[in-house]
Image (cartoon, rainbow, N blue to C red):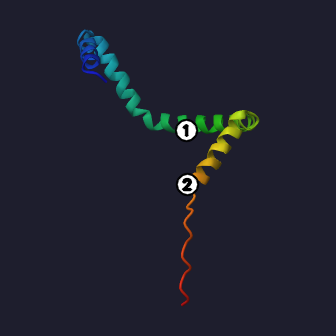
Amino acid sequence: MSPDTLQHAWEWLLNLSKIQLILLGGGVSLLVAVSKVMRYLFLLVLLVVLLTALPQISKRYEESPLATMVKQLVHQGTEATKDLTPTPAEPNK
């Protein structure tokens, strides 16, 4: 965020009338007051959407060429980071 943006936002706030400032403050306080309820509602809606859409999204992903590319990249990554030095044998106890 640049200083010019902050300055424009401050000038915008200063140009508001008292009624507009009261309404803005009331809206912000209402959002803060119901934020806990809104958080739970948001999580509930997100859970429902994910549970209903996830099977279709997963099916499309598996059928797309992106899935094979990701699998190939993961395989190459594991091969590239594999430790090639032999581990010394543990001494007998």
Closer to the chain start, of discs 2 and 1, is: 1
Q: Pinpoint residue 46: horizontal percent, then vertical percent.
A: 59, 36
Mark 2 or 1, closer to the camera:
2
Residue 8 has which mark? none
What residue is disc 1 on?
A: 43
Q: Secondary structure at mark 2?
A: loop
Q: Choose top left, top right, bottom left or bottom right for residue 83.
A: bottom right
For label 2, count other residues whose C-alpha is less than 10 Å away and answer few (under 14), some (14-19) or many (20+).
few
Secondary structure of the residue carrying tag 1 is helix
Residue bearing the label numbered 2: 81
Cα distance between the residues tagged 2 and 1:
38 Å
Q: Is residue 19 above or below residue 38?
A: above
Residue at image point 72% right, 34% down:
65
Q: Nearer the viewer, residue 36 or 14?
A: 14
Q: Residue at x 43, y 33 (%)?
A: 34
Q: Position of residue 50 (x, y in %)?
A: 64, 37
- What amino acid is at disc 2? Thr
Can the viewer see residue 24 in this picture?
Answer: yes
The quarter of the picture where residue 51 lies is top right
Nearest the eye: 32 or 2 = 2
Position of residue 91 measured from the top left corner of the image (x, y, whole percent): 53, 85
